[in-house]
Amino acid sequence: MFRLGGRAVAYSVFAVWLLADVAPACAGAFTLRPGEAKVFVSGLVTAGDHYFDSRGRLRSRGRYRKYDLQSFAEYGLHDGLTVFGSSALEKISAKDGTTSTRKGLGRSELGARFRMFEAQGWIASAQASVTLAGARKSEGLAAIGETDDQLDLRGLVAHSFEAFGRPWFLDLQAGYRARSGDPADEFRFDATLGARLAPRWLVLAQSFNTIGLARWKGPYALKQRIHKLQGAALFDLTERLTIYAAAFVTPIGKDALDERGGSLGIGYRF
């Protein structure tokens, strides 16, 4: 246990842990054709027993587990305009001397992506979404970091090209996430490199980066930097049905969980 700040410092470590947020990156800058729809359902497991302190040093700490059943859908409303939404069921367990558990509805998101430019393999889009929290502050320690609503605004750029005789794409996203309470507002930068290595196989290398723009206003004086790496593979069972698997790690960070996990899912195209 930390002795510098007693109970508040120990709680702040759990607050770091309860911020698992690796997206499956189902869409990127691309928009769907009018009337086209995609649906994804996945199971996600996150674990960690170490964290990065305010100087980026890795420290041992308790035990954290999070299980999510996530759903994501997007629909081509008009040419160049795609709407999307997601929701999740979650179970969180945090243990450090005592055990705190939270079960129930996770975050739900609703948003839209608008294509602004497309030419010669390049596409640029703008995206806005609103996320509502499923957890309540009254649910205790395991709900810390899960109770705030969010507004996310971002720009997206993607480029499709050929290399080594195969089709590739690079998707870059930069945005600002406003949060209604702790944690503090954030700058987000995500990158995905994808390659169609075979007619039915698509592999992805992804980077998810969160930079806290201020310290938390509550009792947890955290200013986070979270950097995650993920590898994923998607296999087309049919023209409409896709299965995928992903694994991620957190190689560096500040005031952040040394988070590791994986997901399995299935997608259907209408």
Image (cartoon, helix red, strand yellow):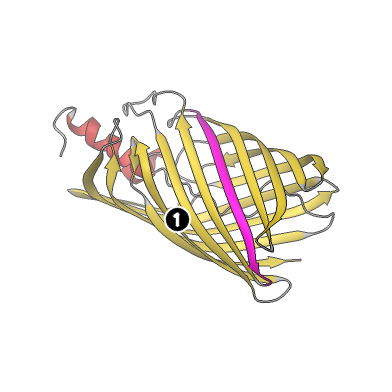
As drawn, 9 above or below 25: above
Farthest-out residue, front? 164
Give the percent coordinates (x, y) of residue 18.
38, 44
The foreground one among 109 and 205 is: 205
Which residue is drawn at the image coordinates 82% and 55% (left, top)? 33
Between residue 133 and residue 4, name the one nearer to us: 4
Q: Is residue 195 magenta?
A: yes
The residue beneath circle 1 is 90
Residue 2 falls in image quadrant: top left
Locate the C terminus by quadrant: bottom right
Q: Is residue 31 above or below residue 215?
A: below
Query: Where is residue 103 shown, x and y percent of the image?
Result: 41, 55
Principal secondary structure, stretch drawn in magenta = strand
Q: In the rendering, at what x and y percent does residue 218 appear?
A: 36, 26
The disc labelled 1 sits on which kind of residue?
A: Glu
In the picture, measured across the screen, residue 25 lies left or right of residue 217, that is right
Q: Secondary structure at mark 1?
A: strand
Give the mark count.
1
Q: What residue is at 46 percent from the left and 32 percent from the top?
A: 211
Quadrant of the snapshot with the N terminus: top left
Is residue 140 among the parts visible in the rendering? no
